[in-house]
Image (cartoon, grey):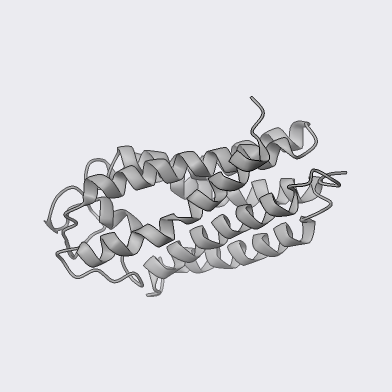
């Protein structure tokens, strides 16, 4: 099914709305919550206390966790629609197909995160999102190879995300603001799709 320009661009704008709505859940947290250090997933944890999941050696209590998880799911759906819309603006070939799958894995990870909170099953909550952060880089590279308009915008975003992934990996060895890094990754990702959807909206010169 062909996604219209209106639906495609709107889906990206709705995806960006995550960062407009998240502060409500942050401010309503009963336990202290710091966006610099705490994972986005903590706001969807369904129980209160320390060690609600294996990596959370701190207190968590999010009274509106149900709606936070709904937000994760809706965000993943709009994210997926936006990615498919961009894919439909490109030449249909193997690079496009593989690139689209690589990008969609991150969006699917958001949906899984909503259906399976971190304290229910951390592995299934996070596996697709973690893999998606890597495959998204591959998807951007493949889309960049197909683009004419928006090519350098895409490559610039790719470099930015590669740097962020390196910093995220360094969390294993040195203390860094994990919550900030995670949010920056998603914010840059959402910004990329929104701007590219607008760039390609006239359907002229999108690909080779």
Rendering coords of residue 190 (x, y %): 55, 55
Residue 119 coordinates in the image, percent (x, y): 22, 47
Residue at (56, 38) in percent of width and height: 81
Q: Is residue 197 above or below residue 179?
A: above
Q: Nearer the viewer, residue 185 or 16?
A: 16
Q: Quadrant of the C terminus?
A: top right
Whether residue 164 sits left or right of residue 155 in the image: it is left
Q: Nearer the viewer, residue 107 or 27?
A: 27
Looking at this rendering, what residue extends furthest in the top direction? 1
As drawn, is 190 to the left or to the right of 206?
left
Q: Position of residue 57 (x, y in %)?
A: 20, 63
Question: Residue 173 occupies which quadrant of the picture?
Answer: bottom left
- The residue depicted at 54 percent of the width and 44 percent of the height is 11
Rendered-image quadrant of the N terminus: top right
34 relative position to 46: left or right: right
Residue 99 in sight: no
- Regarding residue 129, the answer to whether it shows in the image is yes
Q: Between 23 and 151, which is closer to the camera in this rendering? A: 23
> Looking at the picture, how far across and down is residue 66, in whole percent?
23, 45
Quarter of the rendering containing residue 3: top right
Q: In the current view of this chain or complex, which residue is farthest to the left?
A: 49
- In the rendered view, tell whether residue 145 sits above or below residue 108: below
């Amino acid at each position: 099914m062909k996604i219209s320009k209106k639906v495609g661009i709107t889906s990206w704008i709705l995806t960006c709305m995550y960062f407009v709505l998240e502060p409500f859940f942050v401010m309503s947290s009963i336990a202290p919550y710091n966006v610099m250090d705490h994972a986005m997933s903590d706001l969807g944890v369904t129980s209160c206390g320390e060690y609600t999941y294996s990596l959370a050696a701190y207190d968590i209590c999010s009274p509106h966790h149900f709606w936070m998880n709904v937000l994760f799911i809706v965000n993943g759906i709009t994210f997926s629609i936006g990615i498919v819309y961009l894919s439909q603006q490109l030449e249909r070939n193997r690079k496009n197909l593989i690139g689209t799958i690589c990008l969609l894995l991150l969006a699917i990870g958001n949906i899984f995160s909503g259906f399976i909170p971190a304290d229910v099953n951390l592995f299934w909550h996070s596996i697709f999102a973690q893999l998606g952060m890597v495959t998204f880089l591959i998807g951007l590279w493949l889309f960049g190879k197909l683009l004419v308009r928006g090519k350098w915008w895409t490559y610039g975003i790719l470099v930015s995300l590669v740097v962020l992934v390196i910093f995220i990996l360094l969390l294993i060895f040195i203390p860094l603001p994990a919550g900030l890094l995670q949010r920056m990754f998603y914010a840059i990702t959402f910004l990329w799709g929104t701007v590219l959807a607008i760039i390609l909206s006239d359907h002229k010169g999108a690909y080779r």
